[in-house]
Image: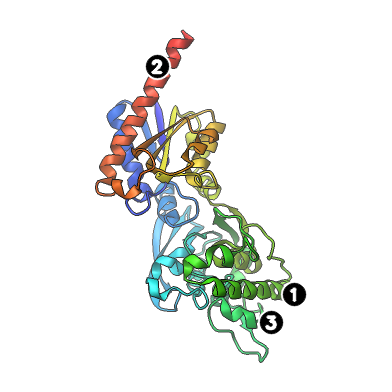
Amino acid sequence: MKIVIAPQEFKGSLSASEAAAAMAEGARSALPEAELEPIPMADGGPGTVEAVVAAAQGQTVTATVQDPLGRPVDAQWGIVGGKTAVIEMAAAAGLWRLAADERDPRIASTYGVGELVLAALEAGCKRLIIGQGGSATNDGGAGMAQALGVRFLDAEGGELPPGGAALARLESIDASGLDQRLRRCEVTAATDVTNPLCGPEGASLVYGLQKGADAEAARELDAALRRYAEVVERDVAVPVIDVPGAGAAGGLGAGLIAFLGARIEPGLEVVAEVVRLRERVRGADLVLTGEGRLDGQTGYGKTVAGVARIAAAEGVAVIAVAGSLGRGWERILAMGVEGVEAIVPGLAAQEEAMERPAELLAAAAARAVNGWLRMRAIAGERDA
């Protein structure tokens, strides 16, 4: 009997690899003779590099880059298969890099993301996968493009300062200095959101507040990104304003499309391809997946729903294990998940399971496997 174990990180307590190991321990205690295959997963947000490198037996690389405010930091990225770079924008420009009183998307920059891309080019990578979750920025990827040789100019021909607010003064874009090695690269922007760049559902008005903007600043940033989109379309000949996913990571999606020729793809699908999830699920008897909290949002491009969809297509049973259950978690049962096992049952706070996360997750996985075995036995008796 084969069990594939494919969770994402349990945010704040266990990485995807640690969660997979804990769930494997629980599954082994319930079914010692089973063949277990842990596959750490992610959906393009924080944890993507760690999950992909672990599952695909790649390597982790460290580069010194700028954080959202231009300070030097060490950021990790990954190489898998020799020529594929896996980059999390949050490693350089993530909200976690800033103290609460430093958060200001009007001045935060994605320059460090461009430096990570440069590091990948220097390493000879020909495919770039860039995860877009957890950003502190709202600059449309302009900072990233600047690191790669693009110039953003005001009416006097001067270079714009960092940050999304400065884009309101954008007069022209000079992309002649863009690193030519990008022409030989395939670039994928991995995200779990489909927001456009501007408007009521755009980067600024939907996500600006959580990055430190007030309502007035969010409207200012939305107008600045609209100006940015106009100049990008005029000077670079790439329309970005209405592209689904262009608003991901404060508009980094738009910058990746315009300057790197990126394709926007669902993060889970990108990760699943790299780690060969479909191939490894095929022929299994059971898939265990999971995340820290299952709720009504889990079905929208998140890891559990994506793993369930892939497993269901291969005719494999899926059980989800969660740290806790939030309102609307039942929706996942319509997406291929046959059962749910929670560390903390009901509408409880995830923090209740934080003190001994690995131990409790292993116990929940054991309960999930035992419950599945009982259901299987009952179904066999009925068929007989």
Asked if residue 171 lies left or right of residue 57, the reply is right
Q: Earlier in the sequence, mark 3 or mark 1?
A: 3
Question: Which residue is labeled 3 in the image?
Answer: 172
Where residue 48 appears, as percent x and y from the top left, is 45, 54
| CA distance for labels 3 and 1 | 9 Å
User: Which structural element holds mark 2?
Assistant: helix
Instruction: Reply above or below: 33 against 130.
Output: above
* Residue 178 visible in rendering: yes
Q: Which mark is residue 377?
A: 2
Q: Residue at x 53, y 80 (%)?
A: 162
Where residue 49 appears, as percent x and y from the top left, is 43, 56
Question: Which residue is labeled 1 in the image?
Answer: 234
Protein image colouring:
rainbow
The three-letter code of the residue at mark 3 reads Ser
User: Which structural element holds mark 3?
Assistant: strand
**Extreme-top residue of the structure:** 384
The three-letter code of the residue at mark 2 reads Ala
User: Which structural element holds mark 1?
Assistant: helix
| CA distance for labels 2 and 3 | 68 Å
Q: Local crowd at mark 3 within 10 Å, few (<14), some, or many (≥20)?
A: some
Q: 60 or 291, which is in the foreground?
A: 291
Q: Earlier in the sequence, mark 2 or mark 1?
A: 1
Q: Residue at x 51, y 73 (%)?
A: 105
Q: Residue at x 58, y 78 (%)?
A: 149
Q: Earlier in the sequence, mark 2 or mark 3?
A: 3
| CA distance for labels 2 and 1 | 65 Å
Q: Which mark is residue 73?
A: none
Where residue 218 appears, as percent x and y from the top left, is 56, 71
